[in-house]
Amino acid sequence: MRTSALESEGLYPQTKKPEPSLRNLALGILLQAFRDIVAPKKASNKEWEEWRQDALDWFYAYENQPGSFHWVCEVLEMNPNDLRGWLQEYRKSDAKQKKEMARKLTRFQIRH
């Protein structure tokens, strides 16, 4: 028996798109990370800062396990550099621009 026959194809075959439920999970993870940066619920200033920093760390991590930034990008077929570019633009923007960018983000959708 060849060992290559035992190799996994991953979570889904490369010729097919991931199941809608997997895409919804990935989109939910991505949107929560954006929310934690753009408009976190301010339970306390300390918690808000921790959530924001965790989200920033997530966006710039190079891990590839399920739930990671790169995994989310792969499932959603998005370019990680495009998302990081949006985040950098947001962070450099003034308050008015940030508000408009956040408003557009709330309408963000990925088609199945």
Image (cartoon, helix red, strand yellow):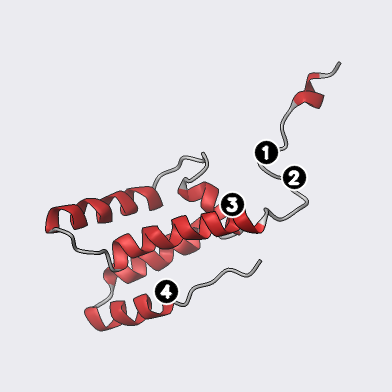
Which residue is located at x 42 percent, y 74 percent? 105
| Cα gap from disc 4 to disc 2, whole angstroms | 30 Å
SS at mark 4 in the image: helix
Q: In terms of sequence position, does the residue under pointer 1 or pointer 3 come before the other?
A: 1
Name the residue that disc number 4 marks.
105
Query: Badges 4 and 2: C-beta atoms under 8 Å apart?
Result: no
Name the residue that disc number 2 marks.
13
Q: In terms of sequence position, does the residue under pointer 4 or pointer 2 come before the other?
A: 2
Name the residue that disc number 3 marks.
74
Give amino acid for label 2: Pro
Residue 38: x, y in percent?
30, 67
Q: In terms of sequence position, does the residue under pointer 2 or pointer 3 come before the other?
A: 2
Which residue is located at x 76 percent, y 53 percent? 16
Q: Which of 106 and 64 is in front in this view?
A: 106
The quarter in which the N terminus is drawn is top right
Q: Residue 11 occupies which quadrant of the picture?
A: top right
Name the residue that disc number 1 marks.
10
Which residue is located at x 24 percent, y 64 percent? 41
SS at mark 1 in the image: loop
The quarter in which the C terminus is drawn is bottom right
Query: Badges 1 and 3: C-beta atoms under 8 Å apart?
Result: no
User: How many callouts does the rendering have?
Assistant: 4
SS at mark 3 in the image: helix
44 shown above or below 1:
below
- Which of label 1 and label 3 is nearer to you? 1
99 shown above or below 62:
below
Residue 107: x, y in percent?
46, 77
Q: Which residue appears farthest toward the left when viewing the image?
A: 45
